Amino acid sequence: MSEVMTSDLLSVAMAAAAEQLESVIDSLIAVPPGPEARVFEAMRYGTLNGGKRLRPFLVLSGARLFDVPDALALRVGAALEMIHSYSLIHDDLPAMDDDDLRRGNPSCHIEFDDATAILAGDGLLTLAFEVLADPATHPDAEIRCTLATSFARAAGAAGMVGGQMIDLEAEKLEATPELITRLENMKTGALISLSCESGAILGDAGADARAILRDFGYDLGLAFQVTDDLLDVEGDEANLGKKVGKDAAAGKATFVSLLGVEGARREARMLVDRAIARLEGFGKDADAFRQMGYFVLERRN
Ligand code: GRG
């Protein structure tokens, strides 16, 4: 009973955060007059088309632990969501995953065209750093600089971009759990981990708190990826808003192909238990993070 209530409360909190986040993104991407309007429209299409807004919710949850105003956290959440959306827009392109459907709608390059989708991703990536560098994100320039550096590391070639490169190379490599774990920690985990750590950066919380939340985020991110692999096997296209069965059709090594369905479920549970155990020192204030662990295990989209 209490688990059901917890997940209901979490859904309400996530929906409220998503609404606030979308209003911030809406105000940050205004469409100017002139022929360049098309790229702004594609940037809005790629960010304001639904999505769970998991990463911004994690930023807000972390910021509340350190009494950081929601307004600051929402700007950092918007920057994260811009980078996440750019990665999805580029990932859907024919040269990468070649997917026509994203969040239940035509992918950005289908709605617009390949060139516009590339530019929309580029525009979102650069806008994210403009948002981080703006004093409205934090009055302290040193904290803004720490944020920008952390974002660059998580999104760049040592993080998400590098993970995507390993993913493209993976079919030439021997698929081991270690390789897939490294790939996924870079491709998906780095941004989710940063989402968990960002509130501590905004709150100038110190290295120990930052490290705990970063490690929590890596465990949560890997559990998220394991459930992503499970959903590709067991999920429902209507719920997911994207095609299923793609990994097996492409002969791709995933946690499910390496561990089996039951093994992957056990792995996700172990990762979430480990993530939650890391939060011991934070008391009840970190309940939103704990609930996110259960959310990741039970998610259907
Ligand atoms: C193209 C540079 C570049 C990187 C692409 C993250 C990524 C790298 C590709 C996405 C491929 C993918 C489907 C990964 C699985 C995990 C994941 C990031 C799923 C999508 O994230 P959600 O579920 O999406 O948070 P929503 O739509 O809810 O925002």
Image (cartoon, helix red, strand yellow):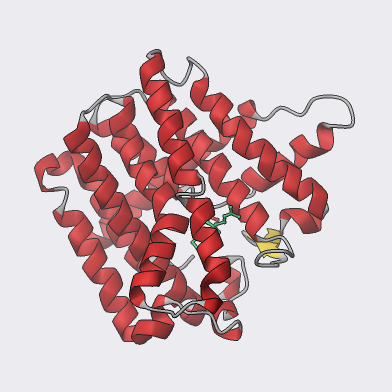
Image point 22% across, 69% down: which residue? Answer: 270
Residue 185: where, in percent of width, then height?
38, 59
Quarter residue 40 falls in: top right
Whether residue 63 appears in this view of the structure is no
Residue 174 vs 98, above or below: the answer is: below
Residue 222: where, in percent of width, then height?
35, 62
> Which image quarter holds the N terminus?
bottom left
Determine whether, in the image, residue 65 is placed left or right of residue 163: left
Determine whether, in the image, residue 52 is placed left or right of residue 101: left
- Judging depth in this view, the residue of 100 and 11 nearest the camera is 100
Quarter residue 272 falls in: bottom left
- Judging depth in this view, the residue of 177 and 37 nearest the camera is 177
Image point 20% across, 29% down: which residue? Answer: 206
Residue 258 vs 300, above or below: the answer is: below
Residue 122 vs 148, above or below: the answer is: below
Residue 24: where, in percent of width, then height?
55, 30
Determine whether, in the image, residue 238 is placed left or right of residue 118: left
Whether residue 223 appears in this view of the structure is yes
- The total number of labels drawn is 0
Image point 44% across, 41% down: which residue? Answer: 153
Image point 43% across, 64% down: which residue? Answer: 183
